Image: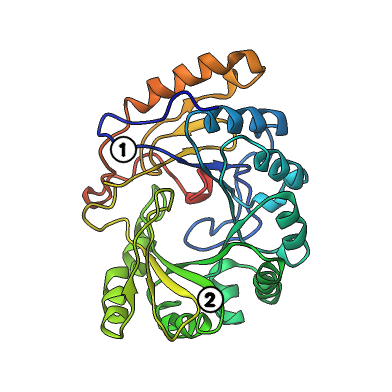
Amino acid sequence: MRDESLEDQFGRRFAYLRLSLTDVCNFRCEYCLPDGYQGTPHGFLSREEIGRLIRHFSRLGIRKLRLTGGEPLIRRDILDIVRDAAGAPGIETLAMTTNAYRLSDMAGPLREAGLNTLNISLDSLDPENFARITGDQRHARVMEGIEAALAAGFERVKINSVLLRGLNDGEVADFVEYVRHRPITVRFIELMQTANNGEYFDKRHVRARDIAQQLEAQGWQRQQRGGTDGPAIEFSHSDYLGRIGFITPYAAGFCDGCNRLRVTARGGLRLCLFGTGTHDLRPLLQNDQQEAAFRESVFAALFHKQAGHRLNEGDYGDTPHLAMTGG
């Protein structure tokens, strides 16, 4: 039973938690990990620590939980983690972001374990272009995974596509056509600058708002965001079964409705994807008697959450790449 809720000094309430299960990724997406994973592939939160963290946050008003990576399906205990999360009190939406390399086999078991929403990273519908962007040849497996997710009966299936000038910005019309007869939301994400991609950002950044304006001119209608929805602005059209969305972190007011917190795979609370520093929660996840101290620690950290990021000022915090904190 919840006895408190999470609110910052700007009156924003937080009902959405993004929890990274690992920072390991087996793809080499050129905008994130062009040289492949270079970290230390161990020392991540255990299943028991993850369970306590989720239960503690659920009693602080978290209603939506997203399991992320790196690539979360790399974890051998992923089904157990999903089952534990699905049983946490108050969690209404249990989501996962994945590159879908195992999804053709895992969609059914994940759904049965209690997962109800899937976000799939897919930056191209073309196999050759997909391989160029991701450094991986398993395009067919990813596409099979999307169809398996639809067949498994997930409440929502979404595709995340990072817009990249000269690589996939010419595929927008293909993605729009892809959702004509599929109940899928394709969300175009603006490339974000991090500590190690400045030159790449200058070369590949595309403004998503320009594409959104083109869709509006074609009759697509903007939809209202729900209370636990992420930052995407979604559009629907009567001739299409699916939707198109946009995540535009450089737009004015992007942070005004922030409703999400992040925890890294090693237990660090991140107040903003592009903030600085982490607040270590792991020492307070070793037994159930630490819940009061955990709660006090989270509230103390939340007091320091800033009004917004400073990407437009060239300040991207201490995020070297998006796999570090679950994107």
For this rendering, which residue is in front, 224 or 178?
A: 224
The quadrant where residue 85 appears: top right
| Image position of 324 with respect to 174: above or below | above
Residue found 50% across the figure and 84% down from its top: 180
Residue located beneath label 2 in the image: 124
Most foreground residue, 79 or 189: 79
Q: How many marks?
A: 2
Residue that label 1 marks:
12
Disc with the residue nearer the chain's start (2 vs 1): 1
Identity, as a three-letter code, of the amino acid under mark 2: Ser
Label 1 neighbour load within 10 Å: few <14, some 14-19, many 20+? some
Residue 258 in the figure: left or right of residue 29: left
Q: Is residue 228 above or below residue 58?
A: below
- Left or right placement of residue 227 versus residue 145 in this view: left
State the residue in front, 2 or 13.
2
**Amino acid marked by disc 1:** Arg
Q: Nearer the viewer, residue 209 or 70?
A: 209
Residue 312 position, x and y percent, is 23, 52
Residue 232, image x and y in percent? 38, 60
- Across and down, in percent, residue 325 comes to 50, 43
Q: CA distance from mark 2 to mark 1?
A: 35 Å
The answer to whether one can see residue 173 in this image is: yes
The percent coordinates of residue 41 (x first, y second) are: 68, 41
Which image quadrant: the N terminus? top right
Residue at image x 37%, y 27%? 302
Mark identifier at residue 89: none
Element marked by disc 2:
loop
Q: Residues within 10 Å of mark 2 (few under 14, many from 20)?
A: many
How did the renderer colour the structure?
A: rainbow
